[in-house]
Amino acid sequence: NFYEPMMVLAAIGAVTSRLRLGTALTVLPMRDPVYLAKQALTLDRMTGGRFILGVGLGAYREEFLAWGGARAAAAHRGEMMDEGLEALARLFADRSARFAGKYYAFNDVEMFPKSVHPVFPLWVGGHNEAAVTRAARHGQGWLPGWRPLRELGDRIASLKAQAAALGRDPATIEVAPQFSMTIDRTLEAAERRYMASGLVAHRISLAYTGRDLGHQVKANLVGSPEVILEKIDALEALGVDHCCALMIPADSPGEMDDQIEWFAAEVLSKRQRGT
């Protein structure tokens, strides 16, 4: 029960002028790279360069199988992801792009207009080592899910080392982990609100990914304004450039609005002032 993301972002882009828009994440193995490249470049142009395409593997293989049937059952999503990233890179950059892979193939595709940016802002999602390698090779940003802080620091170091080994400037890859955000007057109150949310129940269903859910309060933007500001400082010290507070568990639009306004007034404004 949701709207198609590209159409929604086009509608939002038409009535805004400063907001950066993006996907987190578009499941690349479930998209045709030629059509996805055209959608992304169109949004890029129509929003004056405000669109970021975040792509990922997809959490659930069951979803992939339901979408693709027998064809998907024989496919390896990691291989599709690698081919899709290479295909997108060529479509974004080459005057006449061609690609011949196991899953995707096209010849002499001219994809114009190109991005308003010298390099299209493609962010690569995923938190395992394969995702880090993909981001180092193809990404203008790395958009993993939350991880225990020590592991996140290790992954950031690996990303920078691999990018440098490929001849890239690591500073050109924006490190932008996804976090959930719950704010309250005290850490204890925020933790109670967060742990009672449907988001935590959803995370339990993702436990097969190997995440230790015991870290989630500490590793996400959960707490009082003062605690969240301390967490952001710690994340910055690890090498995080952009704290994507993407998931705000709430039982109503009004509660979500209250959380966003509280976060803006007590966290964002203080970070912007440097206080």
Image (cartoon, rainbow, N blue to C red):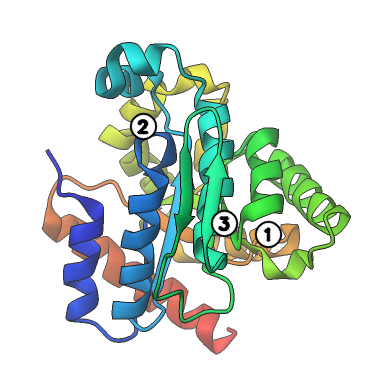
Q: Which residue is mark 3?
A: 89
> Residue 275 occupies which quadrant of the picture?
bottom right
Label 1 is placed on what type of residue? Ala
User: Is any part of residue 24 visible from this angle?
Assistant: no
User: In front: 110, or 248?
Assistant: 110
User: In front: 109, or 29?
Assistant: 109
Q: Which residue is mark 2?
A: 200
Please rate how many residues cluster around mark 1, counting C-alpha atoms within 10 Å: few if below 14, some from 14 to 19, many from 20: few
Residue 113 drawn at (x, y percent): 39, 76
Q: Nearer the viewer, mark 3 or mark 1?
A: 3
Element under label 1? Answer: helix
Label 2 is placed on what type of residue? Val
Label 3 is placed on what type of residue? Ala
Residue 142 drawn at (x, y percent): 59, 54
User: In front: 274, or 125?
Assistant: 125
Cα gap from disc 3 to disc 1, whole angstroms: 33 Å
Cα gap from disc 2 to disc 3, whole angstroms: 36 Å
> Residue 46 occupies which quadrant of the picture?
bottom left
Cα gap from disc 1 to disc 2, whole angstroms: 23 Å
Q: Is residue 271 above or below residue 139?
A: below
Q: Are marks 3 and 1 in contact (CB under 8 Å)?
A: no
Q: Is residue 145 above or below residue 58?
A: below
Horizontal side of 56 relative to 215 (left or right) equals left
Horizontal side of 121 relative to 173 (left or right) equals left
In the current view of this chain or complex, which residue is farthest to the front? 108
Residue 15 drawn at (x, y percent): 17, 81
Q: Which residue is mark 1?
A: 234
Please rate how many residues cluster around mark 3, counting C-alpha atoms within 10 Å: few if below 14, some from 14 to 19, many from 20: some
